Image (cartoon, rainbow, N blue to C red):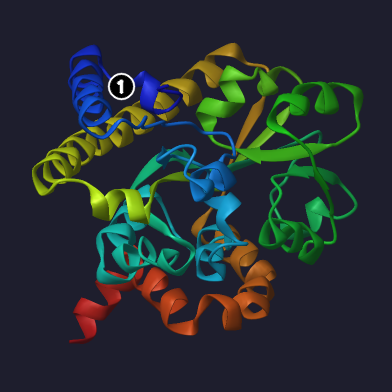
Amino acid sequence: LLDEPFGAVDPVTRDRLQRWFQDVRHELGITAVFVTHDMVEALLLGDVQMLAPSLAKFEQYSPSLQLYDLPFLFDDIDAVDRFQHSDAGQGLLDSMQDRNIQGLAYWHNGMKQLSANKPLREPKDARGLKFRVQASDVLDEQFKELRAVPRKMSFGEVYQALQTGVVNGQENTWSNIYSQKMHEVQPYITESNHGIIDYMVITNADFWNGLPDDIRSQLEDILADVTQKVNKQAYDLNQQAKQSIIDAGTSEIIQLTPEEREDWREAVRPVWEKFQDDIGEDLIEAAQGANQSDATQSETTQ
């Protein structure tokens, strides 16, 4: 089963991947499954061997992975890439080994934007509004810190909830906003790039360590190739979706100045502090160091 975003890979790469999975299945008598819905428990039970859930779903398995939900931590998708390729980011792939879960790769959906039924230019503009959030303690606190009201609900419910006023706003990537037609019921979208929606490819650690070396090596090569393609495609899809939303003319796109974005970051910084002990101060500092502005400043001072 190849679900999004893996199912969106180009046909040649997808066919290559499917052939290798067939080899694994024939040699070991198991099935490798890539999905985006929550089947982590099935993986732990050994019913499936590979998954690609949203990072927001891992807080119960590794508190340190809550790092990826911290608001305004990363400046842009390039900063996310730099961190994920760093020793700290790669180390997080191993953070669930004590639960028999091995991370293999990160896949992007994209940077999140804020949308609402009123303009959101300053943090105070969010006060009193109801926002849909994923099931994440960090995301819950993010909106509470803004004196807004978080409402946890499934992705499929969001459009109707926005349309009927059950919630006033939401956070999502450009591609998700466009594909779910949220821009049709949200007159204002702030290009905040305040968070990341990503997936982690994970496997049952016992299964992975038990693979023959040659098959494991081949799967690693395939994953590296597919990850590069998936992440590039995710970036392209977001750029296309943003332009399509602009062309539709249904939403005003609000661009934050660097000073305005810093105001938002300072407004939600207490969320970082609240989860610092669970995540680790060193990880938060490493993530901040991946920002281009911070990296440039570091090089300048050396």
Helix, strand or loop at mark 1: loop
- Callout 1: few (<14), some (14-19), or many (20+) C-alpha neighbours within 10 Å? some
Tell me the quadrant of the picture where the N terminus can be found. Answer: top left
- Give the total of numbered labels: 1
The answer to which of 275 and 38 lies nearer the viewer is 38
Where is residue 143 shown, x and y percent of the image?
Answer: 76, 57
Name the residue at the left extreme: 214
Residue pointed to by mark 1 = 9
Decide: is 15 above or below 201: above
The answer, for residue 102, to whether it is visible in the render is yes
Q: Quadrant of residue 209?
A: bottom left
Decide: is 290 above or below 17: below
Where is residue 233 shown, x and y percent of the image?
Answer: 32, 27
Where is residue 115 shown, x and y percent of the image?
Answer: 69, 37
- In the picture, measured across the screen, residue 219 lies left or right of residue 252, that is left
Where is residue 100 shown, x and y percent of the image?
Answer: 43, 60
Q: Residue at x 28, y 27 (%)?
A: 25
Query: Please, what is the three-letter code of the amino acid marked with disc 1?
Result: Val
Tell me the quadrant of the picture where the C terminus can be found. Answer: bottom left
